[in-house]
Image (cartoon, grey):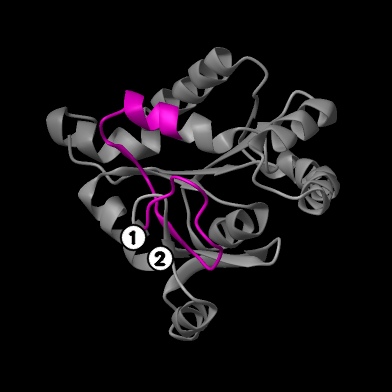
Amino acid sequence: MKREGVLYIISAPSGAGKTTLCKEIIDIFPHLRHSVSYTTRQPRAGEVHGKDYYFISMDEFRSMVDKGEFAEWAEVHGNCYGTSIRTLEECRITGIDLILDIDIQGARQLKERYEGGVYIFILPPSYEELRRRLNGRSSDSDEVISRRIDAAAGEIRESRWYDYIIVNDQFSRAVEELKSVVVAERCRTFRVLETVTERFDMG
């Protein structure tokens, strides 16, 4: 069926598990893809340029900002992240559903600029569990972890304006809940009305 791609915007405090959830849900839906963002941070172990992120210099990032090439961008924990307008438009036109794993600043920018996006917030079960997960990464210093925990309180307060909240307590249950959101949003009347009108006499 002919339709535009759906934009799923997913945010969470660092360590809540949104990246793992996004990867899992993309494996379930063949027409759902992960939006590859641009970032100035250094790659973590195992991350691949062009697959996980486009890793670019601060000068390159600033040049893209000046040219208006980002649909949203933000500085988070000292690093810059941005989503290309071109990426969003290509997927919308071709009917490819897209997941954006972005922070709250970026989500707010998108909410102001784009209609029809689906906003999903992933919560950890508790602050204690969030700290345990961050410590388990073994990739951040104690100072960085403390900064992320402090930031989490403000980020969690922002969850009230998102369309959906999923608590990532049991991973399998969180996957099922996220899967349900994707399925339901694909069936929204305004997304499919034009297509079904072409098939049936809706007058």
Q: In the rendered image, which residue does mark 2 sit on?
A: 84
Residue 81 x, y percent position in the rendering:
55, 63
User: Which quadrant, please, contains the C terminus?
Assistant: top left
Q: Residue at x 77, y 53 (%)?
A: 144
Q: Is residue 188 at least partly visible in the picture?
A: no
Residue 91 x, y percent position in the rendering:
29, 52
**In terms of secondary structure, where does tag 1 sit?**
helix
Give whichever of 52, 18 is nearer the camera.
52
Residue 195 x, y percent position in the rendering:
21, 36
Q: In the rendered image, which residue does mark 1 sit on?
A: 87
Q: Amino acid at mark 1?
A: Thr
Between marks 1 and 2, how big is the CA–CA gap? 5 Å
Other residues around mark 2 within 10 Å, as few (<14) / some (14–19) / many (≥20): some
**In terms of secondary structure, where does tag 2 sit?**
strand
**Tag 1 near tag 2, CB within 8 Å:** yes
**Left or right of 93, for residue 174:** right
Residue segment shown in magenta: 23-49
- Determine whether 50 is above or below 78 in the image: above
User: Which quadrant, please, contains the N terminus?
Assistant: top left
Residue 25 x, y percent position in the rendering:
41, 28
- Determine whether 60 is above or below 21 in the image: below
Q: Amino acid at mark 2?
A: Ser
Other residues around mark 1 within 10 Å, as few (<14) / some (14–19) / many (≥20): some
**Left or right of 200, for residue 107:** right
Q: Is residue 84 at least partly visible in the picture?
A: yes
Q: Residue at x 44, y 45 (%)?
A: 46
